[in-house]
Amino acid sequence: MQKQWSKILKGHIDIRDFMFAREVKLGKYTCPPPAALVAEEIRKRDIMLTPKYGERVKYLVIAGALGSKVKDMVVSPDDYNKDHRYKLNSKYYIERVINNALHRVFVSFRVNVSGWYFNIPKGLSKTNLLVNQIHFMGSTTNTNVPKALNYNLEKFFTLQICILCFEQAEDLICQRCINNPSVTQIMCLQKIRYIEKEANTLEKACKACTGLTMFRTGEVICQNFDCNVYYPKITIKDKIKNINSKLKYVVDSLNY
């Protein structure tokens, strides 16, 4: 259990396992539940996509300000994928969902699940610190983002780390990496090549699924949330957009 809790806290998870899917009957509620709020947002965006009466609507709970209500922290899977500043509310999922279910199982054995969880070491991995650094680097307060995101503490307190060795740095790379330009360039090019190779593998899987393997086409657009390739593909696109661009900048800067 400690291993699984740690994976959730560090974000090493498949978000499909954390989606809620609740039946929604729009027009019936005086105090709409989270799924109905997400359905209303979908309807405001495009009335043709309005969920049918009784249809199950998927949503995720993201991290928000201390004391925020669940209704202020719910987003659709599509919105979650489009804005990579969103993070799953690991505290909510563990303490309100997973631990409650575990307590019902272990109560007969007199196991204190809550105490067990609170005693394990917690914290962000170095990889997650890098992701936070890249997504919030140079960002300013935006009034058009959800309330939950504006109060994310990591937006204001970030640790600057090297994108290669994960040691503390004042810029994209630390002084040790700057002092070894040849090794640093090789490491950057290897990382770029690895990310691009992973992206090509996922794109080939999409083309094989749609029967476009023999054709020269662009990116295959897919909206199947149940596909095993859909979410890894979004993750790798984010890496290409953010991490690869930083790595290429480092390689170019070291050439001069």
Image (cartoon, rainbow, N blue to C red):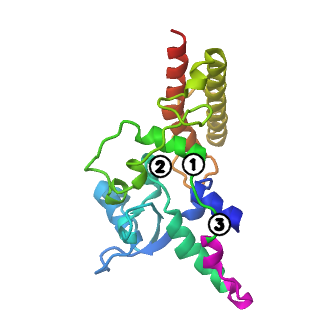
| Residue in the image at 51% along x and 15% along y | 252
Is residue 159 within the magenta segment? no
Is residue 109 within the magenta segment? yes
Give the Cα distance between marks 1 and 2: 8 Å
| Residue in the image at 70% along x and 68% along y | 1
Residue 5 place in picture, x, y as percent: 64, 64
| Residue in the image at 44% along x and 52% along y | 86
What amino acid type should be assigned to the residue bearing mark 1? Tyr
- Residue at mark 2: 81
- Residue at mark 1: 231
Compared across the picture, whether 200 is left or right of 76 comes to right
Of circles 1 and 3, which is in front?
3
Mark 1 or mark 2, which has the lower sequence index? Answer: 2
Query: Which residue is more in the foreground, 212 or 223?
Result: 223
* Mark 2 surroundings within 10 Å by alpha-carbon count, few (fewer than 14), some (14 through 19), many (20 or more): some
Is disc 1 in contact with disc 2, using a CB cutoff of under 8 Å?
yes
Residue 91 place in picture, x, y as percent: 52, 67
